[in-house]
Amino acid sequence: MKKKYLITGIIILMVLCAGVGIGTILSRKGDRIDDSQGVTLDKSAEGYEEEGDTPEEQESIRFPGYPEITIDAGREDIPIVLTNPETNPCYFQFSISLDGGDPIYESEWVKPGDAIRGFDLTTAIEPGDYEMSIAIATKSLDTQENMNGGNVKTTLHVTE
């Protein structure tokens, strides 16, 4: 009789442990900002509608151009829209640097049709003109393999 209660207790304990384990896995999955294929998407990216005509069929990756940007010294953010055109077959990841230095901003992955609307600076930028380099890494939507990236340059004017 004791053996029967012991086996029943062990089975109930195993079922409870399995339930806790499954619950933990499911709750963690909801906290991540991952696409079903394992690419971590940027939390600040949101839907973005481009102006102008977009090609219906496209065989290559479209990289956006960026106009010159002017900000006041002491500003704590850069108001640039980092967009991944809707028709692209890939995710974008942005890395921004000034005058060839270390990156001042790096994003997570951005899916086609989404954009990051500006980013915060960790340190103030001194007044002057800077060459802003926007390096764009890409990953295939289907296979997550790296594709051809791009590097777009613009000028950042920081006024006193």
Image (spheres, rainbow, N blue to C red):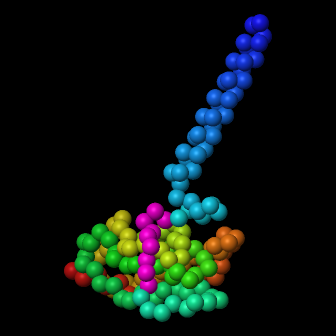
> What residue sits 24% from the left and 82% below the top?
159
Q: Does the image show residue 112?
A: yes
**Left or right: where 81 falls relative to 72:** right
Q: Is residue 101 visible?
A: no
Question: Which sits in the foreground, 123 or 36?
Answer: 36
Q: Position of residue 74 (x, y in %)?
A: 25, 72
Which residue in the rendered view is the most extreme toward the left?
160
Along the horizontal axis of the image, is 136 left or right of 48? right
**Within the magenta stretch, is there residue 43?**
yes
Q: Position of residue 145 (x, y in %)?
A: 69, 72
Above or below, 30 against 20 in this view is: below
The structure residue drawn at horizontal position 27% and vertical position 72%, both measured from the top left corner, is 75
Q: What segment carries the magenta color?
A: 42-50
What residue appears at the point 56 percent right and 60 percent down from the top-left corner?
34
* Residue 128 pos. (x, y %): 30, 83
Let me know if residue 72 is in the magenta part. Answer: no
Q: Quadrant of the N terminus?
A: top right
Question: How many numbered discs, if any?
Answer: 0
Q: Viewed as shown, does residue 114 lie left or right of 155?
A: right
Kindly report the secondary structure that dominates the magenta region of the rendered protein.
Answer: loop
- Residue 129's x, y, as percent? 33, 86
Corner quadrant of residue 82: bottom left
- Does residue 31 appear left or right of residue 39 in this picture? left
Q: To which quarter of the image does residue 137 belong?
A: bottom right
